[in-house]
Amino acid sequence: MVGHSEAIAELRDLLGERLSTGQSIRETHSHDEAYTTPVLPDAVAFPETTQEVSEIVKICAKHGCPIVPYGVGTSLEGHVVPIKGGLTLNMMRMNRVLDIHPDDLDAVVQPGVTRTELNEALRDTGLMFTVDPGADATMGGMAATRASGTNSVRYGTMRENVLALEVVTADGTIIRTGTRARKSSAGYDLTHLFVGSEGTLGIITELTVRLFGRPETMSAATCAFEQIDDAVQSVIVAIQSGLPMARIELIDEVQIRGLNAYNEAFDLPEMPHLFLEFHGSPNGVAEQVDLFRDIANDHNVIDFQWADMPEAHKKLWSARHNAYYAARAMRSGAVGVVTDVCVPISALAPCIAEAKARIAQAGLISPVVGHVGDGNFHLQILVDPKSTEEMAAAKNIANSLNELALKHSGTVTGEHGVGVGKLPYMAAEHGAALGVMAAIKRAMDPQNILNPGKVVPLN
Amino acid sequence: MVGHSEAIAELRDLLGERLSTGQSIRETHSHDEAYTTPVLPDAVAFPETTQEVSEIVKICAKHGCPIVPYGVGTSLEGHVVPIKGGLTLNMMRMNRVLDIHPDDLDAVVQPGVTRTELNEALRDTGLMFTVDPGADATMGGMAATRASGTNSVRYGTMRENVLALEVVTADGTIIRTGTRARKSSAGYDLTHLFVGSEGTLGIITELTVRLFGRPETMSAATCAFEQIDDAVQSVIVAIQSGLPMARIELIDEVQIRGLNAYNEAFDLPEMPHLFLEFHGSPNGVAEQVDLFRDIANDHNVIDFQWADMPEAHKKLWSARHNAYYAARAMRSGAVGVVTDVCVPISALAPCIAEAKARIAQAGLISPVVGHVGDGNFHLQILVDPKSTEEMAAAKNIANSLNELALKHSGTVTGEHGVGVGKLPYMAAEHGAALGVMAAIKRAMDPQNILNPGKVVPLN
């Protein structure tokens, strides 16, 4: 017997077959990719228009029924788990690219469009959408979690790339935040308030996002180092000297082993690597490459390989994007306890060293990968989910790493978000500011129906 | 007889001589640079520490006394006018650069530090703080109004350049927002909520801001065009082709006449101009210059002058920063009715053409200048403040321009903020979203003591 039956009856009248209470559909919407205990929603709705989302929210508000928006379910901290039951709002039928403004370098999309779908729609324009978390996430989900990825060091995260939003608030009101102008001083920055709010303040129903011109030249490279510290120091020097790299990713020797095993045509030396990409004019790229080569040479680079062929290029980044799956494949039956700290770049080397020491101490396997140009890196500690000992050891490492990041003026989550997993750290990271967040949540969602139990603990 | 006497008596006990009720000090704090009716605060406080700001706010909260933070008073929409009386908080004794982290490209400053003071403190680091509104405003004031300026097309506005804040909220609580990490997904983005909130949600007591490395080469240029539309079209093409210009400013023929008169050594042809700056490596700058020259040639550029000497360079930008004063000097006794619309770049040409047509129609003088790379431009309509006819005509133009911007998916204020002057347009720009802003204001400042009557109309 499902809960919230009155709300669901009314929703069925509104949506007909686009409201499902079937077991398998509810199971699909009970979890994301994190190791969080699944919880089934009471029902799943498939809205097709903003107006419909508004009507759904009004029905749920009337009955105090929780609402959890859902895209493709690739979040990594249990964001979409409906921990209080209620309705999951599957946004995948709102998946149209509504407008492309090549002259203004922006596009207007519905939340169910994925990042690769948007880039396909842009194919003939010479433009690109740059934010690229590993998964082919939806634009709505990426905005909701303030996602980033490998390109953010150059082109910014969702924070910098969402210009405007249409949002349905907790009482069903449809609002618009921001404009298509590149800047504005007209009042409170609601766009940035909704970006990263994980569905707890409103349901995103439309996004206006920035686009960039595709660079004339794109050049990729892999650099192998004997010592991980040399790789990290190269990144730090490159960032500090203002080199405008489009991507600079750290892949440690453990992850390289995983990539070699997971990708047939891959055969890199099992050492810490940097994967790089440079964008610009042919001369500009050549200049950047020379400058980076000098920096890498100063830091004992062993092997420096260029992948100028589009083919090799693609292979490289698709391997990087599959790092998560490659890592999990390294230990069969294992789950990954994923960390996501982000620190000022000066603190990157000691934090990575400390992380690797703790992994070794615990006798666990964990790749280290990172968007190191932003000071962001991930462990993916591979543990047997049936071993309470291993789980405890992994959580212990994650915990100490979060504390280390805060000590270094960093954050416990650079790009994955809070969800359920990071909730216990919000007080340590925000202190008294968490009270302000709670006041905002209460003001904007007085019944606490929007993705309740996420982002902000409300006593 | 001043109001709020109980609050003021308690504040005097706390601050001694650093609380002033003297007429001349109150008059100084009764206005900014806008043509807004001055209102005297009941008293002016000069706090020296965050703790003191917190104690002041607690006293004011107890007695329901309004508080208006004040820097150097260069705002342009009446932001600092204490329209409900109460206490003005002069932040200029909190003027220390607290920390410079050259390795992390950030600095921690108190709110009373001005942008040139920060850049002086950075002189030996090879780094720069880039946001540059014309005035030498304070960092606190610039964050509060979400200021930008000539460099924002390349380096962003205060929105992109404030990483973290310390803020005293309406009940005197001291909170910290953000971290020194370059990105974070840890909860609501309070930093961006306070940036642009004009003192209505909290008092900024410390800022962590981004720095950039000073480019190896900086090259400036002036280009004269017969037709303003050719100048604007050159900008549009340059932006659309991704040229990373550091500055690209439009100065129309009226403003050029003003600059020539105001700056002794200035003698530019009285035509619409673009003032440009390119940053990068010597080769990179040369390449950008060539590309821009091609674009300008395609758009009938008349005169193309390079100012590679640091001296000439300085002269150019100091003239640009004095444009406001140069314009006012063009008509003695005149005040300037300043507009600040910002539109998608594709709408820039028709909006500027419409503005110029309306000025001509009204028979008024008004320079047009703009940070056109961002789609932002200003009129400064010179009117005799004693002529109700001229004032009405100017306001009429401003009004129609604001409506035009909204019609083109733009904003009524690109960088000056709301203050008193833009309050009447907030409903048209934000629609139902204004209700969300009001809910946030009520939640964060339930007594409405923080700069009351600004940004959000509360019934």
Image (cartoon, coloured by chain):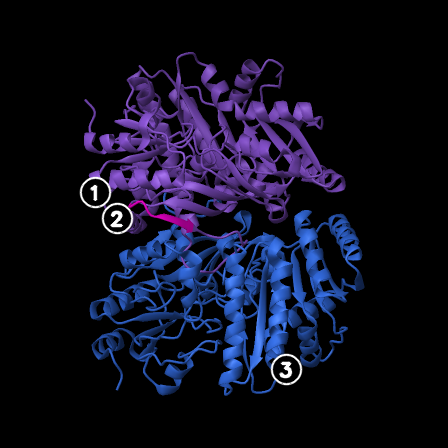
Chain colours: A purple, B blue
The x and y percentages for residue A251 are 55, 27
CA gap between label 1 and label 2 equals 12 Å
Instruction: Give the residues in magenta.
Output: A171-176
Q: In the shown orientation, is residue B399 left or right of residue A75?
A: right
Q: Residues within 10 Å of mark 3 (few under 14, many from 20)?
A: many
Proximity of marks 1 and 3: CB atoms separated by less than 8 Å: no
Q: Report which residue position mark 1 lands on.
A: A459
Mark nearer the viewer, 1 or 2: 2
- In three-dimensional space, the C-alpha distance between marks 1 and 3, rounded to whole angstroms, equals 62 Å
Going by the image, does A356 lie left or right of A1? Answer: right
Q: Name the residue under label 3.
A: B330
Percent position of residue A205, x then y: 41, 40
Dots 1 and 2 on the same chain: yes
**Magenta residue check for A105:** no
Q: Residue at x 47, y 15 (%)?
A: A329
Q: Which SS class for mark 1?
A: loop
Q: Marks 3 and 2, Cα distance to the nearest angstrom? A: 53 Å
Could you tell me which residue is drawn at 36 percent across and 54 percent down? B432
Q: Is residue B3 visible?
A: yes
Chain that bears disc 3 = B
Q: Type of residue at label 3?
A: Met
Residue highlighted by disc 2: A442
Q: Are marks 3 and 2 in contact (CB under 8 Å)?
A: no
Picture quarter with the C terminus of chain B: bottom left
Q: Position of residue A325 (x, y in %)?
A: 48, 20
Whichever of callouts 1 and 2 sits on the residue coming sooner in the sequence is 2
Residue at the image position 63 percent from the left and 68 percent from the top = B369
Task: Please tell me which residue lies in front, A294 or B237.
Answer: B237
Q: Say whether residue A173 is magenta.
A: yes
Give the side of residue A374 with respect to residue A303, left or right: left
Vertical order, A233 against A173 (above or below) = above
